[in-house]
Image: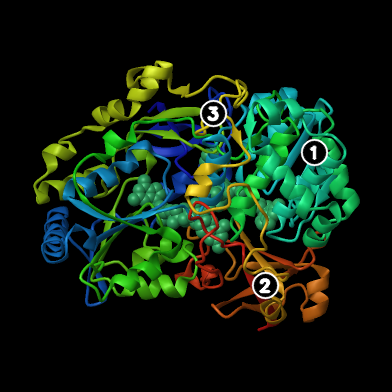
Amino acid sequence: MAVELIKTACPLDCWDCCGMIAHVEDGHLIKVEGDPDHPITQGTLCGKGRKLVDRYHHDERVLEPLKKVDGDWQPISWEQAFREIADKMKSARVQYGPTAIMHHYDYGSSGLLKVLEQRFFNLFGGFTDTIGSICWGAGLEAQKYDFGFAKSNHPDDVAANTDVIVVWGRNVSVTNMHMMPYLKAALKRGAELVIIDPLLTDLSDKAVKQLHPRPGSDGALALGMARHLLDRGLVQESFVRDHAVGYEVFADYLRQEWTVERAADVTGIEPDDIRWLAERYGSGQATSTILGLGMQRYSNGGNTIRLIDALVAMSGNVGRPGGGVQYGNQVHRFDYDTLMANDKPRAYRAFTKVTEADEMLAVQDTEEPVKMLFVTRANPVAQLPETGKTLQAYGAVDCIVVLDMFLHDTGMIADYFLPCTTVFEEEDIMYSSMWHPYMTYVNRVVEPRGNTKPDWAILQGLARELGFVEEFGEGDSVHEWMDIALKPLEERFGITREKLQEKGILAAREEPVAWADYRFATPSGKYEFYSKTAEADGASPIPVYEESVESPLRDRARAEQYPYHLLTIHPRRSLNSQYYHVLKMPDKPLVEISPLIAKETGLTDGDLARVYNDRGEILGTIKITDGQHKRTIKIEEGWWGIKGTMLNALTSNRRSDLGIGSTQYDCLVNLAKA
Ligand SMILES: Nc1nc2c(c(=O)[nH]1)N[C@H]1C(S)=C(S)[C@@H](COP(=O)(O)OP(=O)(O)OC[C@H]3O[C@@H](n4cnc5c(=O)[nH]c(N)nc54)[C@H](O)[C@@H]3O)O[C@H]1N2
Ligand SMILES: Nc1nc2c(c(=O)[nH]1)N[C@H]1C(S)=C(S)[C@@H](COP(=O)(O)OP(=O)(O)OC[C@H]3O[C@@H](n4cnc5c(=O)[nH]c(N)nc54)[C@H](O)[C@@H]3O)O[C@H]1N2
Ligand code: SF4
Ligand SMILES: [Mo]
């Protein structure tokens, strides 16, 4: 039997959005490889991408709809599942209105059609939405104020034109591995690499210098550099005069409140290092600032990104080849509103993901409670901060419906578990708004395993039961939905569904340098050091630095009790919580500490330690790592509570300053031998 090769794309929520080729023999999925025709990812996949096949075949994958009866799971038919869930939805709607049904969703799949969830709830008559982003909300809002939206230079531009690469809080080789060849090409050409990260990364030894700011203090670092540019006359006057608004207000703030020395005190970085990097920014060389999401998961995270944007802008590195401040790339302007039926009159209430537990609990004894919770492409029990609160709030809901493939922490507390297909068993369009502008057509590779269905088909089944299936879309409407969503891209770039199907991969934007025409998407049309939009939103109109809530400089008493910063960063081998059951993992996470922490706590390699604060505690195995910020602990996130580690029991559910993002890295803890 010949092996059939079918093109698809990796659905994982990753910067790279790789093109993939699935190998199928006699209807059986054998393996996936990278698609060499993908202009960016060029035929390579990471381990997680290759292991998507293991997720597809996994023994623990749920293949039948399940209902919890007296604490045990019972397989039921789709008909029964649809009927019972629809009945519960109807009676909640009659008694309390549609907002009694809440929807929590996240980035479990980057498929375009996943947003049909919202179409379903809108057509139902409304729901309680969960908005904001525990992932990158603060930084997105920051870039909205500064630029209009987040847009990045093309990866080729970094490879060809950058002189100084500043990787600022992005763990490139782990989370964005297809960036590596571009960085290597730039380094080979003679570009310099600077890393700004409290932790060591694989790139650390390739850098001319790494700065290790105290976690959460990057805004002060940007301010110290900005002040140095000002003092040395290294500000690009033509940019701040002709293409920006509010620069003078920001410059006054710099003059009045910031010096390099103050920035050094706040960040713990040597003043000479701050000047050194500032002079690189102001040297006239092309400097590309590659931001990750690490430093915006703090209570001051939005302003941190705005301050970095301001530094890059005043140094003349916005809109120039080899420059830019790369945070995200929101160039795929699909027509979501029509696809989601957002114009449908409906009852709508929005909670914020990061604080949804508090908001749910606050309404539970009112006339507008949450009675049912739908969770799709997310594992909030594991991934939302302050697990204790999530469990309490979810525990107060009458019925939880989870659409997923595995019985993870959230699946286990559901009342109905509806098994969905994997990327290999459905058609879709995959894109990521994080980095490159390409989108890929996802062909169906194999038939659905067992009794699984694509998310849209599950929602369609419920819509039929609820009486609005015609409006939702009957039969296989996948192509029609794609056509609706692609309309604006057809108008701007000539991208139609047929063309995408034929070509496989197309870019939503061709120009290599973001904002090269200096026509920004802000209300003024310029770069906004001073944002009236921010002001109207109740935020500071210019970016300012404030200590994060769990900073030892702000809350000394807390820092005495919990003297170490905990960074629960993204894992090398898993994608958030999606692989912990697929990988052979040790029982407990590694807790990486500096030699100083080892000395202060008396802990040594291999010790079992308690990591704790007033919110919770976990157990882990100590590893001493030299070279990371001396008061910072690293643990990779994504563990499963039901397998023993509830990592987010330690983190707080405070919101970020801008963009209702999370503050999961704004977290002080203590350590003790267990
Ligand atoms: N292998 C793998 N790849 C992934 C993911 C995964 O789970 N695993 N997740 C995907 C998702 S959902 C996302 S959002 C992205 C995230 O991609 P990244 O932003 O690259 O990853 P993070 O782990 O969030 O953090 C990045 C870096 O920020 C640093 N950092 C933390 N606090 C600070 C600070 O205060 N200042 C500075 N300068 N640096 C700080 C951390 O030490 C870390 O090295 O990756 C995507 N890719
Ligand atoms: N402590 C700490 N917590 C964090 C972070 C951190 O750095 N530290 N990072 C945060 C970040 S950046 C993010 S993005 C969030 C991620 O939070 P989540 O998105 O909730 O976490 P994932 O583990 O990616 O879980 C996604 C789920 O979607 C399922 N899934 C995959 N494809 C599909 C599909 O097509 N349909 C359906 N219905 N389900 C599907 C997967 O099986 C998986 O269970 O976590 C956040 N939480
Ligand atoms: S997880 Fe990221 S790097 Fe890995 S295959 Fe998927 S898109 Fe590519
Ligand atoms: Mo994320």
At 46% from the left and 22% from the top, the residue drawn is 506
Q: Secondary structure at mark 2?
A: strand
State the separation of the CA atoms marked 2 and 1: 33 Å
Percent position of residue 532, x then y: 53, 43
Instruction: Indicate how the structure is coloured in the image.
Output: rainbow
From this viewpoint, which residue is outermost toward the right?
272
- In the image, what residue type sits under mark 2? Thr
Percent position of residue 162, x then y: 75, 28
Tell me the number on the disc at residue 525.
3
Disc on the earlier residue, 3 or 2: 3
Residue for badge 1:
193
Q: Nearer the viewer, mark 2 or mark 1?
A: 1
Disc on the earlier residue, 3 or 1: 1
The crowd level at tag 2 (other Cα within 10 Å; few <14, some 14-19, many 20+) is many
Say whether residue 71 is left or right of residue 633: left
Q: Secondary structure at mark 1?
A: strand
Residue for badge 2:
621
Q: Nearer the viewer, residue 170 or 138?
A: 138
Q: Nearer the viewer, mark 3 or mark 2?
A: 3
Total labels: the figure holds 3
At 69% from the left and 35% from the top, the residue drawn is 313
